[in-house]
Amino acid sequence: MTMTRQCMSCGHHGMVHNEDDQETLSFNGETVALTGLAGWFCPSCGEGELDPESSKRYAVAHDDLIHRARTKQREDIGRIRRKLRLTQTEAAKITGGGRNAFSRYEWGGASPMPAVLNLLRLLDNHPVAIAGIEP
């Protein structure tokens, strides 16, 4: 007797068990490739259900990816602020926040809004542009 599963996404009967699936995870410019994932996959819509062990590996890799990306973001924020020779208070005024918030960005207690990151990246690439910003 052949075991078949119904896809929870599209309703297709006949999901296929695969022992060597690959996934590439991405988050904020960081990526990780996972190989050897096992689970049931739908040939109709491509949706999949990972087996428990593969699901655990996927979750651990995803959490590690987020941690690496946030660590890099935190380090970049501090590096850019120092490159521009700004105190945390001055950087906070330029980005529209408070000193405590900027401090939390640098030690990882909070993530800045995308606009703050974009401004800092712009200033990192064009430091002379800081002269045109009013605190």
Image (tube, rainbow, N blue to C red):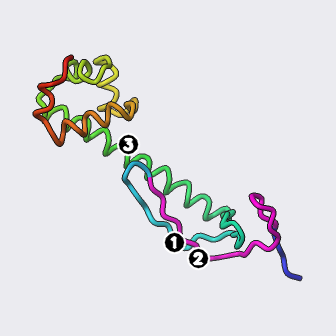
- Distance between mark 1 and mark 3 Cα atoms: 24 Å
Q: Is residue 93 left or right of residue 110?
A: left
Residue 132 in percent (x, y) is at: 15, 25
- Distance between mark 1 and mark 2 Cα atoms: 7 Å
Q: Quadrant of residue 96?
A: top left
| Marks 1,2: beta carbons within 8 A | yes
| Marks 1,3: beta carbons within 8 A | no
**Residue 13, magenta (yes or no):** yes
Q: Is residue 85 left or right of residue 119?
A: left
Rate crowding at label 2 as few (under 14), some (14 to 19) or many (20 or more) other CA atoms within 10 Å.
few
Q: Quadrant of residue 49?
A: bottom right
Identify which residue is drawn at 70% across, 73% down.
Answer: 43
Secondary structure beneath disc 2?
Answer: strand
Identify which residue is drawn at 32% across, 41% down.
Answer: 73
Rate crowding at label 3 as few (under 14), some (14 to 19) or many (20 or more) other CA atoms within 10 Å.
some
Pick the quarter of the image with the C terminus. Answer: top left
Q: Quadrant of residue 91?
A: top left
Q: Amino acid at mark 2?
A: Asp
Secondary structure beneath disc 3?
Answer: helix
Identify which residue is drawn at 15% across, 39% down.
Answer: 126
Q: Which residues are magenta?
A: 6-26
Q: Does label 2 or label 3 sit earlier along the sequence? A: 2
Q: Is residue 129 left or right of residue 49?
A: left
Which residue has dot 3 on it? 70
Secondary structure beneath disc 1?
Answer: strand
Rate crowding at label 1 as few (under 14), some (14 to 19) or many (20 or more) other CA atoms within 10 Å.
some
Which residue has dot 2 on it? 20
Q: Amino acid at mark 1?
A: Thr
- Give above or below for 126 relative to 26: above
Which residue has dot 1 on it? 35
